[in-house]
Image (cartoon, rainbow, N blue to C red):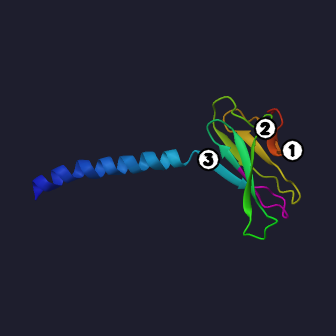
Amino acid sequence: MAKRSRFFLPIVVAACAATAAGAAHAGNFEFLAAPATDLNRIFRLDKATGEIGACQYGLTDEGSIGVTLCYRSGDGAGPQAPSEYGLVASRHEREGGVFRVDLRTGAMSICYVLKQAVVCTPPNK
């Protein structure tokens, strides 16, 4: 029995390490709904690069169940300097955008959908 547990323990440790590595990798994105109460838009942020996009539900003319409409990263919404980024929503009930914050420097940008793309203001603090 003692021999068996000696071989079993390294397998359990390796499995736990693989699971922890997968969980860390799975946390690369942050998602946040726009504060507007009449808008079904969700913003997606790559927490390492600061790249931001957005998706929302859309109706179709055919009367089907609808489609997911996604907006690419446009001006200022692409990858930024490597850092640690987060999303913050204002409490304004009609605000359609979100704040992208650099958690290391404190710089912020306002990001929103404009002409079929997500755009962001230049970072400032």
Q: In what element is the residue under mark 1?
A: loop
Q: Amino acid under label 2? A: Gly
* Magenta stretch contains residue 80: no
Q: Residues within 10 Å of mark 3 (few under 14, many from 20)?
A: some
Q: Which residue is mark 1?
A: 115
Q: Measure how far apart labels 3 and 2 are at the Cα level.
A: 18 Å
Q: Nearer the viewer, mark 3 or mark 2?
A: 2
Query: Marks 1 and 3: which is nearer the front?
Result: 1
The residues bearing labels 2 and 1 have C-alpha atoms spaced at a distance of 9 Å
- Tell me the kind of residue under disc 3: Phe
The span shown in magenta is 33-43
Magenta stretch, main secondary structure, is loop
Dot 2 or dot 1: first in sequence order is: 2
Q: Is residue 48 left or right of residue 40?
A: left
- Name the foreground residue: 90 vs 65: 65
The quarter of the picture where residue 86 lies is top right
Q: Which mark is residue 29?
A: 3
Q: Quadrant of the N terminus?
A: bottom left
Residue occupied by mark 2: 74
Where's residue 39, x and y in %?
A: 83, 61
Asked if the residue at tag 1 contacts the one at tag 2, i.e. Cβ–Cβ closer than 8 Å, the answer is: yes
